[in-house]
Image (cartoon, grey):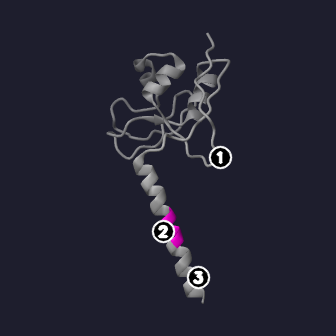
Amino acid sequence: MSLPLPAFDLKSDNNYELMDVEAIQKALGRSRASVYRYANTDPNQNELNLPYDPQKLNPELRQSDREPLLFHPTEVSRFARDVLKMKQVTIQVQEPTQNETNRLLREILQELKTMNQAMNSHHDS
């Protein structure tokens, strides 16, 4: 059976939302357990980031085993098409929803850029 995957809008700045196990479960129409079986992880937790495996669903790199498994939408699409043999695979990514923390960080970044430009123009004078 071939199901199209849910659509996400693509933004040019490559700021996109990674997919968690639940999102992949819904997108692929598979159980949570099967998504974990597909994932390229070490069940014994001896190794955190395994080498790329084209027959598995490869998660993004993690710093700790306490971090959740997250997957790039392109990797999910590749896995669905190449390994699960789903015919219609369309995944578009969208910018994550704006929250207060992101808004404040962007304001801080803008202020730092302004200060940097002011210092550079003062230094060049």
**Residue 33 vertical position relative to residue 109 in the rendered view, above or below:** above
Q: Residue at x 50, y 37 (%)?
A: 18
Q: Position of residue 118 (x, y in %)?
A: 54, 78
Nearest to N terminus: mark 1 or mark 3? 1
Q: How many other residues sit within 10 Å of disc 1, few (<14), some (14-19) or many (≥20)? A: few
* Left or right: 53, with 70 as reference point: right
User: Which residue is at the far top?
Assistant: 1
Dot 3 or dot 2: first in sequence order is: 2
Q: Which residue is mark 2?
A: 112
Q: Residue at x 54, y 33 (%)?
A: 53
- The foreground one among 7 and 99 is 99
In front: label 2 or label 1: 2
Q: Are marks 3 and 2 in contact (CB under 8 Å)?
A: no
Pick the residue in front: 109 or 31. 109
Mark 1, secondary structure of its residue: loop
- Amino acid marked by disc 2: Leu
Q: Residue furthest right?
A: 87
Q: How far separated are the C-alphas under marks 1 and 3? A: 31 Å
Give the residue number, with chain letter if any, for mark 3.
121
Residue 24 shown left or right of residue 86 in the figure: left
Alpha carbon of mark 3 to alpha carbon of mark 2: how far?
14 Å
Query: What residue is drawn where x is 53% and y is 68%?
Result: 113
Residue 94 appears in which quarter of the rendering? top right
Q: How many marks?
A: 3
**Residue type (three-letter) at the residue carrying disc 3:** Ser
Which residue is label 1 attached to? 12
Q: Is residue 3 magenta?
A: no
Pick the residue in front: 68 or 92.
92
> What label does residue 93 carry, if any?
none
Magenta highlight range? 110-114
Say if the magenta span includes residue 111: yes
From the image, which quarter does the N terminus lie in? top right
